[in-house]
Amino acid sequence: MFDTRSAVLGGAEPWAGATEQAWRNWETGDPEALIPTVAEAAPSGVFTLELDAAVREVEVLTAAELVDAAIGFERVAAWAMARQAAVLAEFAHRPADESLVPTATREPRAFAAEEVALALTLAPRVGAERLEQAERLDGVLRPTRDALAAGRICHGRARLIAGMLAEHDDGTAAAVQARVLPGAGRQTWSQLRAAITRALLVVEPDQAERHRKAKRRRSVELYPGQNGMATLVATLTATDATTCFGWLTRLARGVEPDHPDQGAGSMDQRRADVLVALLTGRLVTTSDEVDSGGATPVQAVPVGALRPLVQVVAGGDHPHGHGR
């Protein structure tokens, strides 16, 4: 891109990643065949300065040059995140008194995750996760960090690999990494996730053990949205999630609208309304009968001092609402 092939080899070592075809082109008289393009050059601080200088006037660049520049900045971003991971891994074991202690005798720094979260303006949980991944990338997943630093994979893919292997021991992590890393840079995020899943099935065929490790990641998370909305996400076992969704659907079919002339909304909207009513203690059933569509009539009622919560008990073939 721009003048990326304009340099003269001048006795310098040829590009280590040159392909066989590049060597053939060089042998047949192309002096620039062994000089890497933006998409091939290893990102670095110097590379970043050159790329920044090359795009000072983006309006004069061709479409191909603009795409090359986008690739270059993507590789720079990956390199920067790899360097940050290395710094965070070192910080995690740097003593508070700043003394230089031999690596083998270092203890984890107290409150390191909290310091990182504060410095990077992250939620405490996110700061802790960033630090844990940095430490893993400094250990058994070092090849993943090296690929990130070389710009062969992006930060999102590196986080995916580290995240999916977080609950697995070093032996399993190393074996899965060896299987998926070579092709990770040519795969989409979803394809890489599927590849890691397949590799785990091969490396760790014990389904019960894999499920036990995965179950540790169950959680409920809240993400702020726009216009007064938010997203509540629950990570559950497949059995629990399917059962919960089934009951929400069954109860949603029996929702009685506050204003009959306006309708009860779509099924998704009714599921959301039932979920809120259930978790805030406002869900009651209005009948013990289940209609032909498998619905139990329900409605939401205000929470009062004498009716603080409502318990839904699966008795027989349908749920009942009971104040408690």
Image: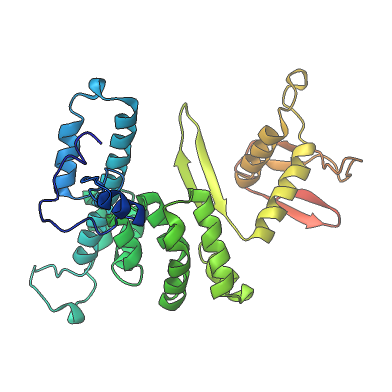
| Model colouring | rainbow
| Viewer-nearest residue: 66 or 281 | 66
Query: Is residue 82 placed above or below 170 in the rendered structure?
Result: above
| Viewer-nearest residue: 8 or 86 | 8
- Tell me the quarter of the image containing the N terminus: top left
Q: Looking at the rendering, which quadrant does residue 278 occupy?
A: top right
Residue 308 appears anywhere in the view? no
| Left or right relative to 3: residue 98 | left
Image coordinates of residue 43 in percent, x first then y, are 23, 49
Q: Residue furthest right?
A: 292
Image coordinates of residue 145 in percent, x first then y, are 31, 61
| Left or right relative to 194: residue 74 | left
Residue 269 appears anywhere in the view? yes
| Viewer-nearest residue: 114 or 10 | 10
Seen at 62% across and 61% down, the residue is 237
Count of residue discs: 0
Query: Is residue 203 placed above or below 300 in the rendered structure?
Result: below
Image coordinates of residue 133 in percent, x first then y, are 34, 62
Q: Looking at the rendering, which quadrant does residue 128 occupy?
A: bottom left
| Left or right relative to 191: residue 274 | right
Image coordinates of residue 220 in percent, x first then y, are 52, 52
| Left or right relative to 266: residue 149 | left
Seen at 27% across and 44% down, the residue is 37
